[in-house]
Image (cartoon, grey):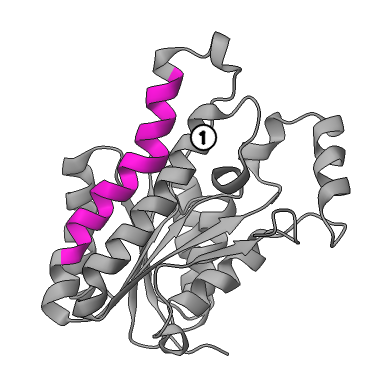
């Protein structure tokens, strides 16, 4: 099993769904984890409790990472709690689906801020301690929607495609400092965010997935843990799709 002993990780949007699975898997492999959340304190504390019950180390830190000041406060809290930062997983995000002709400016801005600006904010805060340490792993959670598009999700697709471009550019900037930057693009993973889809829409996605099933949050987490590990030291600027073959490049 990938060993992350003595590593310190920050996972944004870690109180539920894919973020929760990522936080728990990183901790299972030995990392101390900062469980970031925006509003659901009880859910975040439950993740911390699950980690500590299994013998791991974790703290919950509230921050709206779409705000620059709060993203910086989150990274500072991680440094104060554990003394360093080795791994940053930018997972926080939201959806507000609508056809473009009916999409409000508010819904566009909300998704861009939550899904894309948050990545900029957290990376900007995290790179300083990583550069000082001349080591680090940044993993940004994108989506296959950012690769292939999806009707009714122009805001989400733009944000997630932006995450991919951001990832590749930052990987070129930070490579000389021994910091890797990669993206993981999940396919259809049943979570609270996907519950807005109709059963007909879900079945349509299932039919297009060669493996013939939906993914699990834990399967995304395994990919993240690999990219956070020493075994992935020569991988940077890549997009790892975890989608059952839904979108083949």
Quadrant location, the N terminus: bottom right
Residue drawn at 15 percent across, 73 percent down: 131
**Element on which disc 1 rests:** helix
Of residues 7 and 180, the one nearer the viewer is 180
Q: Is residue 223 left or right of residue 11?
A: right
* Residue 153 placement: quadrant: top right
Residue 248 image point, x, y percent: 69, 59
Residue drawn at 39 percent across, 51 percent down: 165
**149 to 57, vertically: above or below:** above
* Residue 241 in sight here: yes
Of residues 60 and 66, the one nearer the viewer is 66
Task: Tell me the residue that label 1 is attached to.
Answer: 156
Quadrant location, the C terminus: bottom right
Residue 64 image point, x, y percent: 31, 40
Local crowd at mark 1 within 10 Å, few (<14), some, or many (≥20)?
many
Q: Is residue 79 left or right of residue 136?
A: left
Residue drawn at 51 percent across, 70 percent down: 224
Instruction: Write down the region rendered in magenta.
Output: 107-127
Magenta stretch holds residue 116:
yes
Q: Is residue 105 left or right of residue 210?
A: left
């Amino acid at each position: 099993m990938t060993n992350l002993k003595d590593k310190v990780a920050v996972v944004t949007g870690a109180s539920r769904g894919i973020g929760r699975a990522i936080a728990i898997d990183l901790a299972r492999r030995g990392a101390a984890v900062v469980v970031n959340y925006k509003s659901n304190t009880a859910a975040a504390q439950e993740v911390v409790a699950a980690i500590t019950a299994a013998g791991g180390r974790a703290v919950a830190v509230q921050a709206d990472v779409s705000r620059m000041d709060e993203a910086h406060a989150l990274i500072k809290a991680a440094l104060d709690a554990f003394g360093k930062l080795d791994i940053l997983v930018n997972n926080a995000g939201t959806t507000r689906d609508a056809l473009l002709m009916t999409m409000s400016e508010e819904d566009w801005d909300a998704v861009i801020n939550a899904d894309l600006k948050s990545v900029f904010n957290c990376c900007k805060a995290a790179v300083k301690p990583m550069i000082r340490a001349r080591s680090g792993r940044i993993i940004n959670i994108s989506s296959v929607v950012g690769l292939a598009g999806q009707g009714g999700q122009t805001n989400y697709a733009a944000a997630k495609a932006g995450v991919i471009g951001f990832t590749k550019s930052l990987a070129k900037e930070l490579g000389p400092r021994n910091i890797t930057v990669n993206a993981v693009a999940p396919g259809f993973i049943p979570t609270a965010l996907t519950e807005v889809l109709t059963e007909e829409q879900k079945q349509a996605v299932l039919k297009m997935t060669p493996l013939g099933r939906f993914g699990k949050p834990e399967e995304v987490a395994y990919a993240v843990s690999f990219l956070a590990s020493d075994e992935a030291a020569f991988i940077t600027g890549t997009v790892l799709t975890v989608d059952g073959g839904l979108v083949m490049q």
